[in-house]
Image: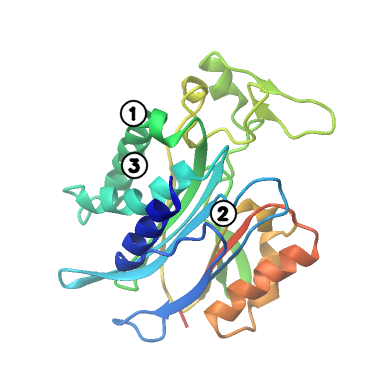
Amino acid sequence: MTSTGREILHKMKVKAGLSSSASGDTGKGRSKMSKHITHGYHTVEGKSNHAMEDYVVSDFKQVHDKELGLFAIFDGHLGHEVASYLQTHLFDNILKEHDFWTDTESAIRRAYHATDAEILEKAIALGKGGSTAVTAILINGQKLVVANVGDSRAVVCKNGVAEQLSVDHEPSREKGMIESRGGFVSNIPGDVPRVDGQLAVARAFGNKSLKIHLSSEPDMSEQMIHNDIEFLILASDGIWKVMSNQEAVDCIKHIKDSHSAAKNLVEQALSRKSKDDISCIVVRFR
């Protein structure tokens, strides 16, 4: 893509209320319906020999008489194109599902699969890479619906205790599924398990050459937002490689500003020598 094309794409994303993190980004906002609910995000490019591959969405959107908090982290691999596509299309596809309001989980599952199919159809333009995804939709400040494929993670703090809402889709954990599709999981000393010796996650969007052995089926969870739920952390594996869920919660539980909390988590990961791209969103409920 030319520099002019990238500039036009960036302007389109800004107008749509999306937050591109192709070169690192930071920001914050709050709910209009529930003023005490705030969000902040922070990203930083890693020390790997490639451009930033993380993208985030962190925003509130009015839909008819309802308010949706839309939060997501897309962690690309073998290029940023698939993660960028997810940033601009996945939530749109979810909200287009006719039964989103009546059967939210089924709508999200269908949208995940439909978006993956779109990405595979556009493989020539989007390239051979792929992306993980963790999404969280907050409905009227009352119900949180989380979905994920890959190893980005959603964690809530409940009365000071970390509770993971997503599932890390590690190849060793899903070896049976991969082998049933004709693939294999490598276990080379000094390296992490990989699908067909290549990909370090068992579920992802894209990756056309590996798709026959991969899944884009999301794991789902729902969390009602009661008084015991203090905040939500969404983060790419650049944080979780160097920090446990409880360590992350303890690191920011006394920081009232969501943006400062997200930035602090990223800085803590860097201080622990995380070399990957790092993206973090914090949503405070009280």
Q: Nearer the viewer, residue 147 or 279?
A: 279
In percent of width and height, residue 141 lies at 34, 73
Q: Residues within 10 Å of mark 2 (few under 14, many from 20)?
A: many
**Location of residue 187 (image quadrant):** top right
In percent of width and height, residue 9 lies at 36, 56
Who comes first in sequence, dot 2 or dot 3?
3
Q: Which residue is mark 1?
A: 121
Who comes first in sequence, dot 3 or dot 1?
3
Who comes first in sequence, dot 2 or dot 1?
1
Q: Which residue is mark 3?
A: 109
Seen from this angle, which residue lies furthest right?
189
240 horizontally vs 92: left or right: right
Q: Which residue is mark 2?
A: 153
Residue shown at 21%/47% (left/top)? 97
Give me the C-alpha separation between circle 3 and circle 1: 19 Å
Is any atom of residue 35 visible in this view? yes
Q: Is residue 111 above or below residue 104?
A: above
In percent of width and height, residue 163 lies at 58, 61
Is any atom of residue 38 visible in this view? no
Disc number lying in front (2 or 1)? 1
Q: Amino acid at mark 1?
A: Glu
